[in-house]
Amino acid sequence: MNTQNNVNETGQDGNKKSGISDEASTLRKPWNAFATPTIGKAVRGLSRLLHHGGSAFPGKVVETIDPTFLVRTLGQLPYGVVLVSGTNGKTTTTRMIASILKDLNLKVFTNPTGSNFTRGVVSALLTEVSASGKLDADIAVLELDEAYAVHFVQQVKPRYALLLNVMRDQLDRFGEIDNTARLLSKVAEATTGTVVLNREDRRIAALADVVPEGTQVRYFGLSDELRKLFPSDDDMHAGICQPQKRRPGR
């Protein structure tokens, strides 16, 4: 995979760029926005005490009383949001990226396992923001379920997106594998900086066609020597394990 150092990208004025800060700055805060962190933290504490509502309940309350909390809070991040999605591998990949960025001395906000939906991200933010709503982080690395990722990008445009794969083991949720790919295409369309695609998955690789002008596309994948050892989902479904003749990014 091309590992161009986009983390250090700056705007023309030399300042750090955020893919969503301009959008966040134009939002009108509700009158009670000053109290949102305090209310959210209180609800989260009470929820844990009563063992009620799980990780989604505090997020649901905050979304109700302050619908712009998510956008405003993530809009503070100088390097924006990295969104990781796909059928399999989200949690491991998210942890790897967060660990790498921390080693680069960046302060990373990430959502815990099991909070890979929009309200879960809101709940996770409540543990990190101060009473004034300040998020002490440089960048967010977020694992999001394919369906909830669509709702997320309607509010927050990620600076980076890493789209892993679409597999048939999710057909009970999304109906067909191409429908899962369509969900992830919404993420690719909304990304402002760089989209990283799995070139071994033809449905994911094809999402390069919907990436907006000005957004870069990068690929990751296997060497030709390893390709035959790791069949794609289509290969396994068809019962054949042959390398593809042409792959993007080669």
Image (cartoon, rainbow, N blue to C red):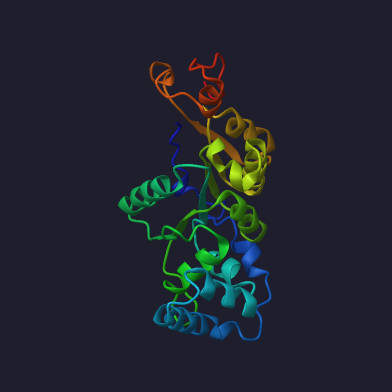
Which residue shows up at 58% across the image and 34% down it? 204
Specify the quadrant of the image occupied by residue 208. Answer: top right
Which residue sits furthest left? 103
Specify the quadrant of the image occupied by residue 75. Answer: bottom right
Q: How many marks?
A: 0
Which residue shows up at 50% across the image and 26% down it? 232
Is 244 located above or below residue 219 in the figure?
above
Is 239 located above or below residue 26 in the figure?
above
Is 152 located above or below residue 175 in the figure?
below
Which residue shows up at 42% across the image and 49% down it? 91
Where residue 124 appears, as percent x and y from the top left, is: 46, 68
Specify the quadrant of the image occupied by residue 33. Answer: bottom right
Which residue shows up at 47% across the image and 44% down it? 6
| Quadrant showing the N terminus | top left
31 on left or right of 193? right
Residue 90 or residue 13, whichever sits in front: 90
242 on left or right of 92? right
221 on left or right of 13? left
- Residue 232 in sight here: yes
Is 97 located above or below residue 129 in the figure?
above
Where residue 43 appears, as percent x and y from the top left, is: 49, 82
Where residue 20 appears, as percent x and y from the top left, is: 60, 59
Residue 199 or residue 10, whichever sits in front: 199
Where residue 113 appears, as percent x and y from the top left, is: 42, 57
- Residue 167 in sight here: no
